[in-house]
């Protein structure tokens, strides 16, 4: 399946080896639990949770997985991220390390609050 063919999160996850699929399903379940009102879709050809706009994306790559909580999500948790590779809206995690489920939960909850706040114009 080509990356442009993903129609569902299951399509995306199914393209990875079993060990990576398990990690992606755990990340997915953690975000769902932290944002039960959010819906899922494929956006930018990766799994995305939506709640009053894009909430958080996640994806696996050859040697890491990434969480995409937007610039504010990265900035807010920067101190906790230590030596993680970050860019404006992305946090990279090694596939070899345990999943930081508490951090994923807190980042997701932060994004829910952020997306729930009235927008300033």
Image: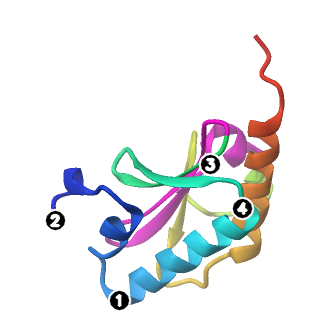
Give the spatial CA distance, label 1 vs label 3. 25 Å
**Residue 17 among magenta residues:** no
The residue carrying mark 4 is: 36
The residue closer to the viewer here, 43 or 58, is: 43
The reply to whether the C-beta atoms of the residues labelled 1 and 3 are less than 8 Å apart is: no
Residue wearing tag 1: 18
Q: For label 2, count other residues whose C-alpha is less than 10 Å away and answer few (under 14), some (14-19) or many (20+).
A: few
Q: CA distance from mark 4 to mark 3?
A: 17 Å
For marks 3 and 2, give the one nearer the viewer. 2
- Residue under the image location 62 percent in, 48 percent down: 69
Q: Which residue is mark 3?
A: 69
Reading the chain from its start, which is encountered first: label 4 or label 3?
A: 4
Q: Is residue 27 above or below residue 116?
A: below
- Judged from the image, the secondary structure of the residue bearing numbered disc 4 is loop
* Identity of the residue drawn at 64% across and 63% down: 83
Above or below, 92 relative to 64:
above
User: Which secondary structure, mark 2?
Assistant: loop
Tell me the element at label 1. helix
Q: How is the image coloured?
A: rainbow
**1 or 4: tag closer to the N-terminus:** 1
Task: Choose the circle earlier in sequence order: 2 or 4.
Answer: 2
Q: Is residue 70 magenta?
A: yes
Give x and y (percent) for residue 100.
68, 75
Q: Quadrant of the N terminus?
A: bottom left
């Amino acid at each position: 399946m080509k990356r442009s063919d993903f129609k569902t999160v299951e399509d995306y996850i199914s393209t990875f080896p079993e060990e990576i699929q398990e990690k992606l399903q755990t990340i997915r379940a953690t975000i769902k639990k932290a944002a039960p009102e959010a819906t899922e879709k494929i956006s930018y050809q990766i799994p995305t949770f939506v709640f009053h706009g894009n909430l958080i994306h996640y994806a696996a790559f050859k040697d890491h997985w990434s969480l995409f909580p937007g610039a504010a999500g990265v900035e807010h948790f920067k101190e906790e991220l230590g030596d993680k590779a970050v860019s404006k809206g992305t946090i990279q995690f090694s596939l070899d390390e345990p999943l930081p489920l508490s951090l994923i939960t807190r980042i997701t909850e932060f994004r829910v609050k952020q997306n729930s706040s009235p927008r300033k114009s």
